[in-house]
Every structure is written in structure tokens, then in C-alpha cells.
Amino acid sequence: MPQNKSERPHKRAKLEQNSRKAYKFSNAADIRRALQNQDQNGQIEALSALRSTLSVKSRETVAPQDERLSLVVQWMESSPGAYDIFEIWEGTNQSSSLSLLVSLLSSVLTLLSSHFPYHSHGTPIIKTLLSPKWMRKITSYFSGSNELLLVSLKLLNTISHFGGGRERKTLYEAFPWDIKTLAKVAHMRRRGKGDAEDVLERPDIRTYYVLFILSFIDPETSSLVKSTFLEQQKDIFLSIFKGLSQDPYLIVRKVLEVCWVGLWSDPKVKRTMKIGLFAEITIGHLLKLYECTAAENANGDHIPADLVHHFLLAICTRPGLGICFRDRGWYPRDIDADVVDEPKKSGKIYNKILSNILKSLKVNEDARQQELALKILVACPELVAGYWPAVALTLEPRLSSKWIANIAFFGLVISQPVPVSSFLIPGNNIYQPDPPPLSTILESILPSVSTKVHFSKGLQSTSHLVQHCTALALARCLTKLSCVFRTFQDVESALEEDESGQWTRRHREVEREARRRVPDFQVVVAFSQIKVDAKEVKLALLGESAQRLLWLYHLCFPQIVAEARFDVGKLLQGLVDASQDTIREGGNVCGLHNLKQLHVLRLLQESDQFTWSGKVANSSHTYLHALLKMFCATPTRAVRSTLRSLLMKTLAESILFQEHPDEVDMWLDSLPTTSRGTGCEAPDGAALTDESDGVATFLDDCAQRCIKTPYRYFEALRDLLPMENSAVDVPSPLLMTVLEQFAAKLAGKLLTPSDALAIAGFVRRLMFKLASKQRDLTFLRIFSGKLDDAAMPENLFSKYACVTAAIRREMSIMHTCFSHFQGVRRRSDSSTSPEVEDFLTKVEGVPLPESSSARIHNAYELVDWLRFVNATLQPQDIVRLLVVVERFHPPALKDLFENLHPANSLMWEGGDLKTASRQLLQVLSFDWMFTQSSEADMANQQCREIMLECLFLRSPTRVQIEHAVCIIAHDICSIMEQESLVCDLLLLLSAIMQRALGELSKEDGARLKEFVLLRAPSIHGLSMSRDLPDAMQEALCALLDVSLDPSSEGDRTMVSSICTYWTECFKASIRSGSLQMGRSIMLWLRYTDPNNLLNIIDQACDANNVALTPSVLEVLEFALDTLRGSFTSASSRIPISQLLRLYRALPDSEVLEEMIAVAVTSHLPPCHDGRHPRAKTLNFSLSPRYLPASGSSQLGVLPSNFVSRLFQKAIWTESTSRIVSGLVYAQSGVAKEFVAWFNSGAWTTIPFEHLLPAVHAVFDSLGGDAIDLFHDTVTIALFDRMLPQRRHPEGLRQLCIRCICILIKADVTRKQQFASLLQKNMQRLAVDQSALESVCIASRLQSFSPLADLVTDLSERGLHWAVRHFSGPEGEDEEDQLILAQLTKIAKQGFKAKTYFVEPLLTTIIQNRLADIVALDIGIALLQCSPLKPVVVNRTLQNILQHPQFFKLCGSEESSRRDLIIRFIAALFRLHPTNTCQPSHIMPLVRIYGGTISASDRNLLNIFRLFEVERLTPISSILVKWSPSPGISISSQLDAVQNMDPIRMLRTCHVFPIWRRMSDEQEDEKVGLDEQVYDPLFVTLLVAQMLTHHPPTSSLEWVQTFRSNVFSLLIRCLSAKDEKIREASLGLLARVWKSVELSDMQEKQHALYIFNLLKNLIKPSHDGPPLRLPSFASLILSHALRGVFYPSNFIYPRTARFLLQRPELDVTDVPMLYGMLYGSSDDWKKERGWIVRFLSDGMMSTEDWKVLKRRHTWDLLSSLVQSSIRDQALRRAVLEVLANLTSNVQATTSLVLKSSLLSWIEMQVNLPHINEDTLAWLKILENILTTANTTKLQRATNGQWQDALCRCLSLVLQNCSAPSLPILQQAARVTLRLSLASQTSIFHLSDVFMVVIGILEQLEHRIDFSKSSFVNEPAILSKPPYHGHGLHVQPPVPDPLRAWGGIVEDLWQASMGLDENFVKWDALTGRLLHWRGIVGEDGSPMGEWARLEAVRVSRSSITNCVQSTQMA
């Protein structure tokens, strides 16, 4: 008896040791013998021993050789299904025995499940256990003892995991989920706390229960089982989350892992179902795990809180995944343009679940929950606005940890980035025209939770910590506000809005509202001025936050600051002190002081009230003085950069620098950077103070003087400027003030020696900087002379000789910089002086000071020593000095190098710059490196590379590069007589230009080139110089090579003035007859405009031969070579007669001959010889000159002796061949003259590759007449030369083939002789060498019946080649593709190949190229024309079906490959059906059959039906194992039906193939989604088999069958056109109806009601099948039936209410039309979309149109679209309805005549957003043209409907923003149909043509015309009428070139109906001829006809011209 539930479970007594030894199991007999023991105790002992023997530990791996497994297998073989265990089980009720039996079965199944071969032994056991009888037994134990319950759950888990879950579906169906004890089981944990690590090793009852539930959603479970389980047992699944926080870590991890991998990562499980499971309640259970923060293992990494945190991050923070929906940022979910600013009371958002989760997160207590909340708000910006009132954070300032945490979290939320992506139109990079709502923006920046009050109170708090936290939070808000303002400005700029723009208005509204929510500015000012008696760190923190707030207020609210009259200049006071050494040593507060400085400087930059000329309090200095001092003193790069920007902004706006604002940068770079300590003295005793202070004071004084009387200094500047030189750039007048004051103060002894030296150094550096900006140094030399006069020794300091010498040294350096390479460089050879040696030795021994300021002072003391030292230094001294300075302070090296005298050239050797490190280059500058270089350094390439690396080390700007170029240009100008040095400088300049043009933008690069070549006087002078030495010319050529691109129009225009100068020089030379500047002229001719070159050639042609000297001819040759790239334009300018005159002077010029060839061919049609142009891009813009419009031709006036001179040439070039060929096409007389010359035998000395094009031209132009002109011997010799040979070039092989075919066809008398010669020649060559000729000749002669044997022989050689080719590696070149294309063509035209050629080819294709589309196409063609024997066919079929990749290839997504393979198989089956229709051949096909409507599946179904006819055996016996999914095993037809994809089945109901027939003859029609639609014929037959053999028996099976939507499809079949399908479907539905009546499923009454409605609709038919049911009736009933079994679908209550409200369904009415179209519920948009889709799906026939017409449905839809312009989804859905309507003749005609459809379309295509639906409109227009009753329309509208169609087409194409080839293909076909229609207005049609050709020209640059197109047939395009499904899908374009050719042919054919004067006729004809040249004669018969006609017209025009000339 089972024990009492209240008692604790007793442990079973352990068996005695001797009893255990009594049972040893070595084989199955031992087991059976032990189990047959009749004694109950003995039986228990045997079971216990057997269980112990077979027990398997958790996670143990069972090896195949395991003894336990072998023992179980033997046992199961002797006792199948373990029937002896079940006998014992059935005969006992003892709890201990039952536990042993259940546990034993669990162990047995575990062992058998370990390896696949043994699964068959376990399957009978599981089937027995899952039977109702035994399942009741197992579940009854749930109310028994705990041990029995535990082993029962273990057994269920074992069954669920058996064989990877193969029986899980059966287990789910067998398990009684409604038992009441499950709720108790979910909470039965093991008492006491055991080791957490053993929880999965020894699971308790709850653990087994959780694992059992999880097994139904783990990754191994099929998606269908998961979905069914979660839909029907949702509460049971959710029960495992209750109390999950009490489970161990391992259980929690298991649950979350399975939920993520098995549920969230399975895309086949509907997301709505997943979200329904993880709603707020489930997430609430998971949030409790955040409280489990203690680690459960020794390593400390098993923390449940971390586990659930990462899980929630995964499902809550990634938009589009988990429960996180992708929202619209700050835009509401349902936006209404009229009330966009009003907050919605209903508050619809995308993420309601996350919004509720946020409310329950404890963000101020747990860092994990805070992170989760922040990431949710980042992922869903829409939640921020509603978050603040929901959570009600305590933000009132108070000194508490909770408030500090709250205000910190508040700042983090506000700091989230602005959702800029939501401002864009979805799927586009265009900004939305409407801004987000004002309330949402403000709540995300400054929430309305008493923000102003709290912030004001916090800033005025007595607690400094509260003040600091408040300031930080407010700063975050203002920073976010500034980001929003910047984003709004970007949007306003992109949308080009004015003051009335929506974004501009919203910008002002946000600013106005934000001002109300921030504290008053006076509060912030008071906070910044607060006196803090505290530590330095606290003071620095408060000061930094205060300055940050002031800056942000200036940035965001400039008007508030202006109203407060706050003196921003006062903030500068005290900032200079922060830059001194004391601050450098400030430790922790240094960074805060730097930040404070940054805030103040940024504030000043934003302020409009700050002026540099304002006076500092209690001082005579201005703010400029303070800024300059700070700029010199600060070591922080960010502060220095901000200071530079501020000074440049403020000074550039003043009168000092308003003319040249970029000059401020040079003044700042010239400021001193030396740092001196107190007490520094010069060697003469002069006190040395900080240089920056003296220079700043001096400049401040000068600026004040200059600003007071600026015109005085302007006049002084004007007096000093050389007026005759325009290249001088006027500097700032402040420079004259500096000169005046420096001289005055020196003369008046008003400067200290230290300040005088500092000012002299500053001015010297400034002069050098200005030299890099001035194009002429005259002014600077004058200025430096006056400066030198002011600093004469008598004006300096007589007491301080060292300082005086140092000042004079500065003047000397300044003069030397202006004359860099002019002075004589001398260096004393004496050794280092003793004084210098002693000093250097002393400083080298100085230890490194600990203080950073002391190290800096020491470094700059050494710089001062260099300035004062009198002794001459040597390079080794500089080396030692550098080492010491670098040790002290590396940045001081810059000052050290700048103070080296350039005359001594010590920098390169002393600094060892040739091996300089990157760190050393960073402190150097290019200008000083260049100035310090000598001639030897400049000649050294390594030195030039070092200078280049230094210049580009920091990514210089264009202005900086121009300054470097300017310095080089100055030196070139000054040393023009030094040839080698100029060359070196030009090489350096070339390197700079090459590097700069590679790094700068295109615009900056163009401006730099202009500066170098045109604005630099020295370079421009070199370019215009007539007597440059050769070396200089080469260097200049190198500069031009890297600077200019001869093919660039911009570059040619830039240097056009220079090029014009040299062309004029050349013209003068031609006139004078002497040329001395040939090399210079050729240097610039490369960049000369083609028109100027043509003028040169014109003049040369007109000159006499005496003037054309060899030097002139050399230049002419070069000019012609330059024109090589523009021959087409050249030939249009120069008459051929002039070229021939020039040809007499240059008879050996290949370039001129090529130019004549181009001139000749330019007067002929393009591709006139039918050859491929072989160019990536083709120029169609030129009007062809081959038409007789002009009435004259230059080819008609050629000199009579020109042709004969060509024939007399001993050496022919390619150009010669082109000239002769062109003349042959142009004049028939030339052809005859060529034949006569040919008959003379002179052709034998000419290379055949140059001769063949002319021969081909004769054959092509004269045809058969040419054969009669040739002598017999010549013809035979010529034919022999054209035969395939190894040495023929690739390009001439096609010409040989064409000529051979022409000869054979034209020469009737010798055709057999030619055929014999050809066969003999082929036999001599290997197959691989002559395969191209074989197949091409065979293809051309295939229709020539007298040579059938020759064609067969050549074709079989092609097959032989194909066998070898397909046996080799994959991959074809262009020749192979052409051979295969021709071979396919031959096979398709009925070539009768011998079996012994076809069989090996088929075998090779199957073995090696089954995935090759071309090979399969050849194989299919050969099967249709070759008499293969049955045994061969069978063997071939078996090879395919047994191919190792067969199932992979047939299951691939590439439908074209699958279609061809199945077509191949179908062709084999039809050859000998009696032999091929074998079960072994059919079985593999069942596996690849998908049951869809695709062509491949229809072919397979036809094979199955052929099998039935031939074998007289139903296919059902074979299809019983058919599975809709390859990975699912099926046991019956019921399983197959239930596993069919319900979504695909529903799609079949929507896209119902009404054309499907039950008979074998199928119409060649396709629906839009081939593989996505089931075949209703197959589904009908499958359901019939299911109802016959395996009908559903239980309620669950019936529900699952209904949920597959097959019965909905059967109802839809009642609308089919085929009577047999309707009859079969009706019979099946009647049987289903009867079966449902007998079932007990819950949905029985609902289904019967629908079936009864259907029964009432079926009209009885006494003499035939049932009448067709209207589509709308069958469709609504299909939806209603589906809704019964998918009640969660939104349409279910609507269809149910509609059907229940009426006793019968009216088939003449549109169901639910008004209620859904004009609904007012919350789901009105869904309803409207559904009914429009319903109308589209139901419009399938004329009867359906009558139903729609009765309710004026189209009028309703058209008005609805008109009123909802912005609803793109609605517009697209209505277009699908219109596409289906225009697919019907009656509907189309009625809409055009009675509903003004064309006028409505014309209005619609003028609306915005139409460009997104261009393809759909084009298809609809073609539908109208195709289906409408044109006769009726013509009679009713008098042809006006076609004009309206033209206007619509033109507007559609004009509004297309993204044209593509598919769109253009569609447009071309519509245009062609319009042109073929009668009485179409030529005026409107011409407009259409102009638009279409314009789009064609736009797309042509994307096409590669150099490729060949070898497709035998054009791509099969879908044919009209086009239906709604797939209307908006652009088809792929596999071959853009072929698509282009088809478009050109359609347009050219359509243009035939236009006037003769159509402007685009020439362009279209040229394109057609090019297309004919690309694809050949067979590829474009239309193009071949046009070519022949164009050549004929051209020849007639030239002949008329010749006759008129002779008459004249």
C-alpha cells in the first residue's frame, strides 16, 4: 500500500551483501531467469541488482563497447519491448517494486538512446509506455510516495530525451497535462541544503519537473512541437518561473539557457508567442533573482544575479529582439500631422512591457538593475518621457545617499545620445519633414518634475556636495540640450528651411520652453562666485562645475546671458596664474584647473560681448595681454588649441587682421615658448626675465596703439609697399606698429635687455613665417632692413655686450632666412673651443632635477647659452647639446633648433636628422629644416625624404602645405642660375605635391595645384621660360607628372594660359620655319586642350613642306600621339584631305595612320563590320555621320591615288587594315580594286591578320558577287589560309569563321571541295584547338541542308570537346562560354547526335557538372534529339539519383539549378516510360518534392502521375512517407498534413492558382511566389489519402489538422476554374463535415456553422460538377475557418461576428467592406489593410469584378488613397488591387471608360512619394494596354485614352528617383506597346521617348560593354497581365548587358513609328548597332538588319557625293 502522504518517506532497507552477490548478469538468460523468480522479496532483490548493474550516472557517456549496453541489447533481442518487465509491473502494487521497475526502465532507455543503431530496441518500450493504459499508471504515481514520483519524472525525462527527442511529440500528446498534482510537483524541493554542485547530478522532484518542461522547448525540439506546447500549456511552462529565485544557480542557468537557445533563438516560433510568455509577471519572477547576490561556489562566479542580469540584457535591450521593439525614437507610435504637438492621453508606445518593467527596477539600490534600466532607455528612447512621472524619483536636494544616487541616475538617463536615426525617414537617408513632439523632446532633456525648483535649490544649498551633484546633473541636461540644438541645425540645413520651417519653429519652441525649466542665470552666477573655505580639491571641483555651467548657459541661452549683463571678461582674471609652475605642481587639481580654463575660454568664444580690447581691472593691459600670456605659458594641448581658436576669432574680426585672418596663426606661432626661472642672467650680467611676459606686454601696447589710429599705420604700410609688384600680399598694419614701437622703445631705452632680445626673436620668427605667405619677398626685405636699422648697436645696450650680440644675431638669422642659398657657407675647421668643451662637460654631469619646472628651466638655460655664446660651434658640440636638452625637456629641442644660425648649417649634421626618430621629428618643423639645409643636403634624396616626412607627420592642411611650397618657391627664384640646386628643389616640390594630392580632398588638391603652378612666381616663370636647361626641364616634367592629369578637364583648364602660350610659340615656329623650343613645347602639349592641338595640326596641314622641318615634325608627331585618346573628336574637326596632306609629310607615322583610320570609320555606321567594340564604356553622344542628311561625305572626295598607295605598302599595320576595310564598305569601287590587287598575288607578303579584315569586308559588303571576282586559285589559297590553325590570333578567329561560312554558302560549285578541305584540316588539329571553329561553323551551316554531313561531323567534334571540358576543373573563359553557347544552340535546333557521343557527355555532366546550369541545358537539349537506348537512359537516371550531391543540389535555394536538374530527370523519364518508371527511381524524387506550385515541383508531380499510368500502381503507397520538411520524419499522411507550413498554406489561399487543372495539360502560368505557394492539386490528393487511410481520431489531431489550414484551402478550391478540382474538394469537405460532427473537439460548433454556411452556398447540379463559388465567398469562409483555430488572430472576432449576424452568406456582395474599410476601432489601420488585401486576393475573374462593381468598390478605394497620401502601405495595397483589376478585360475597360482610371492615375503619379512605386505603375499601365478592349476604348474616346496613357507613363518616369534596369525594361516594353497601338499621338510618344532615353543614358555608365553575352535566348521575363502579388518586387538582373540590349531593341522598334526628324533616332540606332556587334548576328537579327541597311545607306550617300563631285 502506498504510504500516508503526511508521513515522511521511509528509506528502503539496503539489501544484504550476500544477496547482492547472488545476482550477476552476464547475458540475457541471466536477466530473464532472475526476473522469473516468483518470490516477491527475491524479485525485488533481482530488480534492485539489475538496476544497479544498468544504472547510468548523470552526464555519463556510454561507449559503444560498454558491457551494460551489450547486455541490454541482448536482453531486448530475446525479450522485445521488455515485455517481462511490463508483466511484473502489471502484477505488483508494492511501492518499492514499482520504484525499482520505473527506475530500471529509465536506465534501459538511457542506454539504448546512447547510439542510433539501438534506438529500434527502445522504440517498442516507449510506445508501450505512451499508450493510454501505462501513461495513466505513470501519472497516477504523482500522488504517491516521493520516491515513486521522483523515478516517474526521471522516466518521463528519459523518454523525452530518447534519440534526441524523436518521441517528444508523441509524449506531449500522450501526457495528461490537466492533472491537478502538477501544481504541487512544481514546489517539491529536497529538504535541507546539500551541495549546490550536485543539483543536476542528483536532481530532486522539482528539478526533474523543470527539466521535463524544458525538454519541450530545447533546441532539439521541432518548432511545431514548441509552438503547440507553448500555446496549449502556457500556464504549465510559466509555472517553472514561480519560485525560481529559490532554486540553485545551476537550475537557474539551465532554465535561462534553454529559454534563450531553444525559444528566443528559434525564428520559427512566433515572436508574439514569446512575448506573451515573457510578460510583466514572468519578468517579475526573474527580477527576484537580483536579490540572490551571494556566490554559490568556491570560485565566486556562480551568482544568480549576474545570470539573470545578462539574460534580461539580451531580451530587453536589443531593438527588434526579445521583448524590445524597435520604436520611432522621440516620435509617437501613431503620429497625426495635425496634432503632433499634443501629448496623447492614451499614450500608445511600442514597448509597454519594458515600460512596466522600468517601474519595478530598483535603480538606486542595485548597480545591475541600474545598468539594465539605462540600456533599456538607450534602446527605447520613447520610454524616457514617460519614465519620470512613473518612477517618481526623489530629486528634492538633500544630503543623503539616496538623493545622491537618484540625481546621479537622473544625469545618466539624460545623457543618453540623441536618437538621430529616428529623425530620418525609415529606409532612407532623408530627414523627416515633421519634428518630434515638443513634450517628448523636453522630457528627454529637462523633465517636468520640478526641475527648475530642484536645481535652483540645489545650487543654493549649504552643502557643497549637494551643490556639486546638482551642478553636474544640470550640466548633463544642458549638454544634452546643446546636442539637440546642433542636431536640429543639421536638419534645418539639410532641409534648407527658412524661419518658417517646422524644424526651425520647433528649435525655437524647445529653447523657449527650456529657459523656463532651468534655474535663473543669476543663480548660476551666484554659485560661481561663492566663497568656499575648504580644501583645494573641493574648491577646484566646485569651481570647475560652476565654470562649466556658465559656458553651457552661454552656449544654449545666449539671450539670457545678454539680458543679465554679465561681464564675461572678469573670468579671465586669475586664469594666467593657473598656467604657471605652481599649478604644474598642483597634483590632483591640475586637471581641474585645465578644465576650468577650457570652460572659460569656450565661454568667451561663444560670447558676443567679449572684446579683446577691454581693460583688465586695476591694470593698463587689455584682455589680449592675459590671453597671450596664457597661450605662451600653458602646457595643455586642449587649452592651447582653444586659446588659438579664441584669439583667431577675436583678432580676425578686428581691423588689425580683417583683411588676412589667417595671418593671426603666424603671429601666434611666433610667440616665445621659453621658460626661465627667477634670477637668470646673461653672461654679461643682464637680468633675463620670462620672454612671454615681455612680448605679451609689447604686443598689447602695439595693438592698443594700432586700434586707436589704424589709418596712420595703413598709410605707413602703403608707403613701404612696392606698388609696381602686384604679387605682394598686404600684411597687417600691426606690423608697422611693431616696427615703430620697437625702434622708438630701443631709441628711448624703454626696453630691458631681456625684453629687447625677446621682441627681436619674436619679430625674427614672425618675418620668417610671413615669408611663407608672401609670394614676393620685396616688402619683407625692406621691412627687415628698417628693423635692422632700428636694432643697430648704437641703439642697443652698450653695458651688455652679450645681449647686444644676441640681438644682432637675431637680425643676422632673419636676413639669412631671406637669402637661404645665396650666401657663402663656411665652417671653421678648427676644433671645439676650450670654453665650449668645459661648459658641455659641466652640463653633461648635471644630475636630472626631480622638479619638472627645474628640468624645464635647465633646458631653456642651455637654449639661452646657445644664443649668447660667442665661440663657433661644431656639429659634435650640437650633438652633445641635443642630448642634454632632450634629457631635461624634449620640447625645448624645437627652440634649440630654431636658434641655430642657418649660415653654419649645423642642424642636419649636429642634429643627426638623417637618422632622426619620429619623436625628434615631432618637435621639428619643415620650414626650419629647409632653411637650415645646405646645397649638399638638398641634393641628398634621404634628406629630402626626411623633410617630406616632417611636413606630413601631423596631416597638414592645404594652407600649411602652401606655406612650405612658398618657401621653396622663394629659393628657386633667388638661385635660378644654379641649375643643379633648382633641380633638387623641384624634385622636393614634386615629392610634396605627390604626397599632398594623395591626402587632401579633391577641392583642396585643385587649389594647391593652382597655387603652385600659377600663383608661385618662380614656378610660373619656369613654365614660361624658353631657355631651360635639359636637367631643369626633366625636373619640371617630374613636377607636372605628379601635379597634373592630362585626361582631367579641370587640370587642362587650369593651365590653359600656359598651354596657349606654348601653342602660339609653336605656330610662330611653323610660320618662321625654325623651332628652338621643341622640348618645352612638347612638355606642355600633353595638357593642351584638344581644340588647340587641332588648330596646330590644321596649321601644319596648310603649311608648305619647307616649313615642316624635322623638329616641327617631331612636335607634330607628339601632338598626334597626345590626341590618340580623342580620335573621334579629332576626326570630326580635320578633313581627311588635310590628314592625307600631312600623311605625305609623315608617311611612317603610325599615329597619323591610326587617325586616318578613325576618320574613315567615323563616316561609317558604328560596328559596321559586325565586330565586338571591346570597350568598357561606349560613347553614344556623338551624332553619327553615316546618314545621308548632310548630302556630302569626305570619303567621296578621296584622292584617286590614295588607295593604290595603300596597296603598294610593303608593311601593313592594324590601322592600314582598318582604312582599307572602311573604304571597302564605303565604296564598291574600292572593293573591286582590292580584289584586283588580291588576284595579282601581292597579298602573299602581307601578314594575314592585317589582311583578313579587308577580305571579310569584301565578302560582307558584296556577298556572293565577291566570289565571282576572285580567281579560282586565289579563292582556294585564301580559303586554305582561313582554315583553323594554331597560329591564328584570338581576335581574328571569328572573322575566319564568318568568311569560311560565306564562301561555302556562296560558292555553289566548290562547296563540296571547301567542305572536304575543312574536314581534312580539322582532322589534323586536336579537338581542343579547333573546338571554337567546329561549333561556330556547324551552327551557321546547320540550316544549309546540302552540308548535313559536315555539320554532323563538326558538331560531334564539339561534343568530344565538351566531354573533355566537363571532365576537367570547373570554370570557363570567354572562349569556352562561346563554344558551350553554340553547342547548346546546335542541340536545340534538332541535331541528331550519335549515341556513342551523347552517352559519355551525359555521364560526364552528371558526374562532374550536375551543378552547372549550362551543362544541364546542353544535356536536356541532347536528350530531345538523340535516340538513346532504354538501358542507357536507365543508367543515366540512376547516376543522377545516386549522385552524392543530388539532394543538396535539389534542395538548394537556387531555383534555376533545381529546375534544370528536374527537367533533366523528367526528360529521361519521358524517353522510355516503361523502363524508367520504377519505384527505385521514384523514391529519391519523393524526398526532393516540396508540394509547391513551382515549375520543378509540377514536373515532379507529372513524373509521379506518369508512374501511375505506366505501372498501373497508385503513387500513394510511395508518397506515404512524404514529408513537407526534409528534417522531419513522417509516419503517415496525417503527420504530413499536420507538418505542412500553415503560413505557406494560408499564402496559397491568398495567391490561389485559379488556372490549375486536374488534367496533365498545364498552362504555362506562374504566380508571384513559386516556392512559397503549395500546389492545391497535390494538397487535395494528399488530404484525400489522409482521410482514407489515417484520418484524425482524437480532438487534438483534428485541431492540429485544422491549424494546418488545409481545409481552408479546400474551401478556396471551390473557386477554381477546373471542374474536377472543385468536385474533389467538395467531396472531401463533405467527409470532413461528417467527421467533425462525430468529434468532441471544443471548436466543433464553430466549424460546423461555417460548413453549414458553405453547404447553403453550393448550388445543386444534376448534370455535372458543382458550380464555381465566387472568390470572395470562398476567401471569407477560409479566413473564418482559420480564425476558429487561431483565435488570437485579430480577424477572428470580426469574421465570426459577420457570419453570425446573417443566416446565409450573400455571394453577390463584398463581405465586411464598409465595416472594415471605415472602421473606428483602435485597430482601424489593421482592419483597413486587411480588407484591401482581401479585395486584392479575391479579384480573380469576371464574376468577382461584377461583385466589386456592384458595390462601387474601386471608387471607394481611389478616394481613400486620395485622402491618405502619406500612407505608403495603403497605397501599395491599393495598387495591388488595381493590378488584379487591370488583369481582367471587363474590369479594365469599365474602369477606363466609367471610372476615369487614367485621369486618376495621372493625378496620383504627380503626388510626392510616387517614386517608390515606379515599377508597380509601369506594370499597371502595361496591364491596361494588354487586357483592355482597345476597339471599344478607341471608339469611345477617339484615341484620347492612349494620349492619357502616354502622359501617365512620362510622369511616372520623370518622378522616378532611383531608376534601375528592371524599371527601364518595363518602361521600354510599355513604350513599345504604345507605339504599336493604333492612333497614338506622336507628340506625346516623343515625350515618353525623351524621358526613357534619358534614363537609359543615366544607367549606361554602370554597364561593362567589354563583356560578351553568350546567352542563347533572352532572359524570360514575366508576361502581362501582372497580378498583385510580387507587384513591387524588382526582379534580379543576372546579365545587365543583355538587359540593356533588350531595352535598346524595344526602343528602336518603338521609334520606327515616330517622325523621321526624331532627335534621338541616331543615338538609338547607334546603340542598336553596338548591341549587334556585341552579341553577333544570331543574337540580334534586328540589329543585323539595321547594320546592313545602315551600311547600304552610307554607301549610297558616298556614291551620290562622288557623282555630284564628278559632275561639278
Image: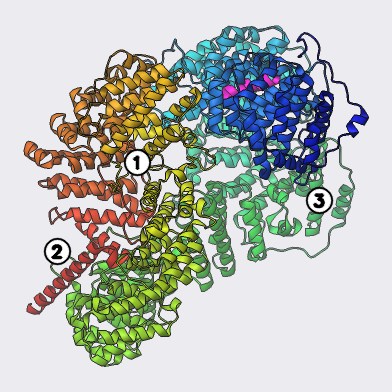
Badge 2: few (under 14), some or many (20 or more) residues near its Cα, within 10 Å? few
- Looking at the picture, how far across and down is residue 1732, in whole percent? 31, 26
Residue 1650 visible: yes
The stretch of residues the image draws in magenta is: 366-379
Report the colour scheme: rainbow
- The amino acid at mark 2 is Ala
Badge 1: few (under 14), some or many (20 or more) residues near its Cα, within 10 Å? some
Residue where numbered disc 3 is placed: 883
User: 332 above or below 1385?
Assistant: above
- The amino acid at mark 1 is Gly
Is 563 on the left-hand or right-hand side of 1811?
right
Residue where numbered disc 1 is placed: 1568
Badge 3: few (under 14), some or many (20 or more) residues near its Cα, within 10 Å? some
User: 437 above or below 945?
Assistant: above
Residue sitting nearer the eye, 230 or 283: 230
Q: CA distance from mark 2 to mark 1?
A: 49 Å
Of the numbered discs 2 and 1, the one sitting upstream in the chain is: 2
Comparing marks 3 and 1, which lies closer to the viewer? 1
- The amino acid at mark 3 is Val
- Looking at the picture, how far across and down is residue 1116, in whole percent? 36, 75
Mark carried by residue 1189: 2
- Looking at the picture, how far across and down is residue 852, in whole percent? 81, 36
